[in-house]
Image (cartoon, rainbow, N blue to C red):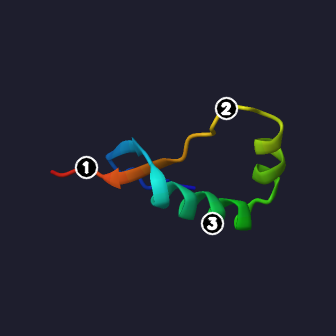
Amino acid sequence: MAADVHEVVAREAEGEERDRLWDAMVAIFPQYKSYRKKTERRIPVVVLEPRDS
């Protein structure tokens, strides 16, 4: 199976964007919610964006 390869830039989501993305991730994988309860740290949400050529 061949995988597509893309160059991206990673950044940490903040504020309203982070909250929206976190809720979307929990809807897909509910275990994230219980994992969050087991730690005091804020779990980062990383956004991957296409790198400009």
Give the structural element (helix, strand or loop) at label 2.
Answer: loop
> Along the line of sight, which residue is nearer the eye, 15 or 49?
15
Give the structural element (helix, strand or loop) at label 1.
Answer: loop
Percent x, y for residue 25?
A: 65, 60
In the image, farthest residue toward the left: 53
Left or right of 43: which side holds 48? left
Identity, as a three-letter code, of the amino acid under mark 2: Arg
Determine which of the numbered discs, if any, sits on residue 43 in the image: none
Tell me which residue sits at (71%, 65%) in the image: 28
Within 10 Å of disc 3 (Cα), the crowding (few <14, some 14-19, many 20+) is few
**Circle 3 or circle 2, nearest the eye:** 2
Within 10 Å of disc 1 (Cα), the crowding (few <14, some 14-19, many 20+) is few
What whole-number distance in Å separates the C-alpha atoms at marks 1 and 2? 29 Å
Q: Is residue 37 above or below residue 41?
A: below
Q: Along the polypeptide, which appears first: circle 1 or circle 2?
A: 2
Within 10 Å of disc 2 (Cα), the crowding (few <14, some 14-19, many 20+) is few
Identity, as a three-letter code, of the amino acid under mark 3: Ala
Q: Along the polypeptide, which appears first: circle 3 or circle 1?
A: 3
Percent x, y for residue 41?
A: 67, 32
> Along the line of sight, which residue is nearer the eye, 40 or 21?
40
Tell me which residue sits at (38%, 42%) in the image: 10
**Circle 3 or circle 1, nearest the eye:** 3
Determine which of the numbered discs, if any, sits on residue 51 in the image: 1
Identity, as a three-letter code, of the amino acid under mark 1: Arg
What whole-number distance in Å separates the C-alpha atoms at marks 3 and 2? 20 Å
Which residue is tagged 2? 41
Image quarter (top left, top right, bottom left or bottom right) of the N terminus: bottom right
User: How many numbered markers are drawn?
Assistant: 3
Determine which of the numbered discs, if any, sits on residue 24 in the image: 3
Q: Along the polypeptide, which appears first: circle 3 or circle 2?
A: 3
Tell me which residue sits at (51%, 55%) in the image: 18
